[in-house]
Structure formats: structure tokens, C-alpha cells
Amino acid sequence: MQDTFFKGLKVVEFASVLAGPAVGMFFAELGAEVIKIENKTTGGDVTRAWKQPSESPDSPISAYWCSVNWGKKHLLLDLTQTEDHSLAIQLASEADVVISNFKPSSARKMQLDPDTLSKLNPGLIYAQLNAFSDPEDESPAFDAVLQAEAGFMYMNGEAERPPVKMPVALIDILAAHQLKEAILLGLIHKARTGKGCTVSASLMESALASLANQACNYLMNGSIPQRMGTRHPNIAPYGDTYLCADGQILLLAVGTERQFSQLCRALGLEHLLTHPDYQTN
């Protein structure tokens, strides 16, 4: 049942790179018909060319592209051409969901904006992925820049060393989850009312929302998150790593006082349980 949950749902994806395509693949994996429109004039989604040195330079796809484009139908269209543009409009007018990361001005110019498409298809759920809180802010949205602007890089890395970018495009992934949730809410709304809607998420807002306890530490206590390596600002020892006698690295994730007691007994360090420095977390 799981891979056919969205059977009969039609999704048209006007999105490239990572966040938008990740949303489209979520629905494809669960049985929806997902049609991805790629830019013919640029050879398709830019990630087709994002290859590691070990990948064939002649291949039309990359491992990166495959990571978020599995299970879709792919159409390479030139939306400046009448025939291709008409096909895109037709597909969108028949869709249950449209996923877009077009700049708002570009979407309006191509008549692929939510206002235009919702008139053609009142039941459409139009899911817009933006870079920043203001949807009209059309500044480029690079994941690495957003990691820096939202504070993730400031927190990430070892103390006394420079900030570190995370090795995956985490902000894109977070925004994809936020937009996915918005679409699911849109589907519930449509099931109850029969009406479509426009939903949106932005990379910056998704990043800020995902600061979670680190943000609350600041908002409630004025504590600015610092680089701590793998350690945790609220719990100890949680994330701390230790080099063992066999050369392997051990990571501890001790989340409660009871677990700390069990750890001390397992290591033969029961005397720490009465030590004044280790009475509470």
C-alpha cells in the first residue's frame, strides 16, 4: 500500500536543483504521477552536470540528479516556444499539484504563476518554494549562503576553529520537508472543501525554524550558540567522542541521569556517581 498511497494524484514539477525536486520525488515514491519539466535550452536540470570525477562526462545524468529525481516522467521543454509553453500550461491545468521554484516575476511572465493557473484549475494546489521570507525577494538562494546567513555555519565546527559548512545541502532538505507538509495540508483542505490553494515555504524560514533548541537557548536565556564540535550545549556527555584502546572512536549519547549512572557502572567508574561535580547534568 505504501508505494501506491498517492496513486491517481498528478504532480507537475517546475523545479530544479534539490529542494523542489525532493518534494516531487516524495510523491513519486508513494505512487503519484510526477511530470518534471526541465529546461531544454540548458540541457535540463543543472544537477545533471554536477558530477564527481569518477562519473562519466558523457552521461546525461549524475548521481546528484538521481538522488531527487527517481520515479518521475521527464520532459525537456523550451517554455519560450509556443508549442512547448502550451503543453506546460495544459499539464498544469490537469494537475492536482504544481511544484515551482520559479522566481515570481519569471512565473508571471510565463503565465505559470499561481493566480493564472488557479483560474484555469480551481482545484490546483500550487506549491511555491522561495528563497527568503519576502517572496518578491529574488536574490539567489544558494544552500551554502543560507547555512551562513541562518547561523548553521557559525555553530558548526570545532571551538577556536573557523565555521564549517555541512557536507549536505541541509537547508534545501529542510525546506523540502516544510513544503511537503504544506502540500499535505493543502490536500486535506481540498478534501474538505473541494478547493485548491497556494502554499509556500522559503529556505530562510525553514532554516530558522530548524534552529530549534539552539534558537530557544538564545531567545529564553540569551545564550548564543558556539562551535563545540560534536558536543551538545544542553546535555553531557552527548555527542562527545573518545579514542579507545583499539584505535576506534566511541561516541556517547547519554540523555538522562539514569543513563549516566548506567554508563559509570558499565565503565567501572562508580565513584563518579558521588563526586560533587557529577551530581546533575
Image (cartoon, grey):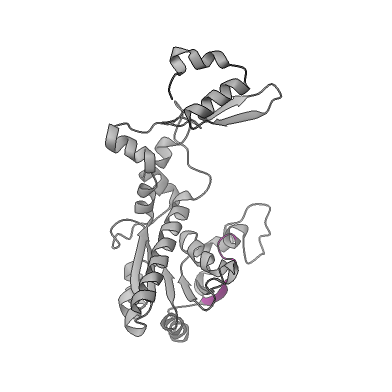
Q: Is residue 124 above or below residue 215?
A: below
The quarter of the displayed image where residue 216 is located: top left
Q: Quadrant of the N terminus?
A: bottom right
- Counting from the top left corner in percent of width and height, residue 78 is at 48, 78
- Determine the residue positioned at 57% across, 21% down: 264
The answer to which of 95 and 269 lies nearer the viewer is: 269
Question: Which residue appears at 41% of the width and 71% of the height?
Answer: 187
Which SS type dominates the magenta stretch? loop
Residue at (44% x, 13% y) in the render = 276
Whether residue 281 is in magenta: the answer is: no
Which of the 4 quarters of the picture holds residue 220? top left
Image label count: 0
Magenta-colored span: 67-76
In this rendering, the answer to whether 126 lies above or below 134 is below
Describe residue 67's horizontal placement relative to residue 214 as left or right.
Answer: right
Q: Residue furthest right?
A: 246
Q: Is 69 one of the magenta-colored residues? A: yes
Q: Give the quadrant of the C terminus.
A: top left
Q: Position of residue 72 (x, y in %)?
A: 57, 71
